[in-house]
Amino acid sequence: MRLLLIEDEHKVAEFVARGLRAERFAVDVASDGDTGWAMASTLDYDLVILDLMLPGLGGTEILRRLRRKNGATAVLVLTARDATRDKVENFEAGADDYLTKPFAFAELLVRVKALLRRPPPARSNVVRVADLEIDRLAQQVRRAGKRIELTAKEYGLLEYLASCSGRVLTRTMIIEHVWDESFEGLTNIVDVYIRHLRAKIDDGHENKLIRTMRGVGYSISDESP
Ligand code: CA
């Protein structure tokens, strides 16, 4: 899952992003309100973690704009302020949850997971393609009932392909979604990870789920009769 963190305090941003990445989330960071809004409004995030006091566009205004644009992205508001008035204002503006600084990472993580578990319409926790099953909350993968161990990036890649099953995803789309936007390597890293995934997901199964569209990209689909 892909998260956007809009936070101008460098130390807080770094500690939150590092912790979330260790939990297998792809995390983009914006350190001012205008950049944050530009990213939130052009990319598709599962969750936005939003500081209120920001240089440039303020957190509450970002929240209002996000809600006008699309209702589905979960928003967790972070703030040093603990005034009831602020909480009410931000819940009214569309925040899903609220965390007052300073906070322990463990508490942030619990709230992030709870928000991602609260599904907007049409988002299911379990994605299935044929006999492949991905539990997005437990981050567990099974094929024909057998547990498959994946690395964080393999998992991210598989989850993205499966959540768009039947659609061909280009290498650029995959890089943007699965790797952080700080990624500066070559898009053929995708080919390498697809090879790893195939070995774990498709080897030994007659019905191959991972497909290559030559010169375009990859998809996962079930075309068995
Ligand atoms: Ca701030």
Image (cartoon, helix red, strand yellow):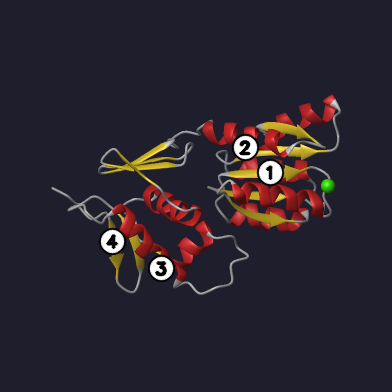
Instruction: Give the mark, 1 or 2, whose residue is nearer the N terminus.
Output: 1
Cβ–Cβ under 8 Å for marks 1 and 2: yes
Left or right, 112 with reference to 214: right
Q: Which of marks 3 and 2 is in front?
A: 3
Left or right, 125 with reference to 24: left
Q: Point out residue 20 in the picture as x, y percentages from the top left corner.
A: 63, 47
* Residue 112: mark in rendering: 2
Residue at numbered disc 3: 192
Q: Which of marks 3 and 1 is in front?
A: 3
Distance from disc 1 to disc 2, alpha carbons, whole Å, reads 9 Å
Cβ–Cβ under 8 Å for marks 3 and 2: no
Which residue is pictured at 50% across the width and 64% down the height? 175
Instruction: Give the mark, 3 or 2, whose residue is nearer the N terminus.
Output: 2
Distance from disc 4 to disc 1, alpha carbons, whole Å, reads 35 Å
Q: Secondary structure beneath disc 4?
A: strand
Q: What residue type is labelled 1?
A: Ile
Crowd tier of the residue under label 4, counting other residues whose Cα lies within 10 Å: few below 14, some 14–19, many 20 or above: some
Q: Does the residue labelled 1 lie within 8 Å of ligand 1?
A: no
Q: Which amino acid does label 4 sit on?
A: Arg
Residue at numbered disc 1: 49
Distance from disc 4 to disc 2, alpha carbons, whole Å, reads 33 Å
Q: Secondary structure beneath disc 1?
A: strand
Q: What residue type is labelled 2?
A: Val
Crowd tier of the residue under label 3, counting other residues whose Cα lies within 10 Å: few below 14, some 14–19, many 20 or above: few
Which residue is pictured at 30% across the width and 72% down the height? 214
Q: Nearer the viewer, mark 3 or mark 4?
A: 3
Q: Secondary structure beneath disc 2?
A: helix
* Residue 211: mark in rendering: 4
Q: Closer to the camera, 25 or 165?
A: 25
Instruction: Give the mark, 4 or 2, whose residue is nearer the N terminus.
Output: 2
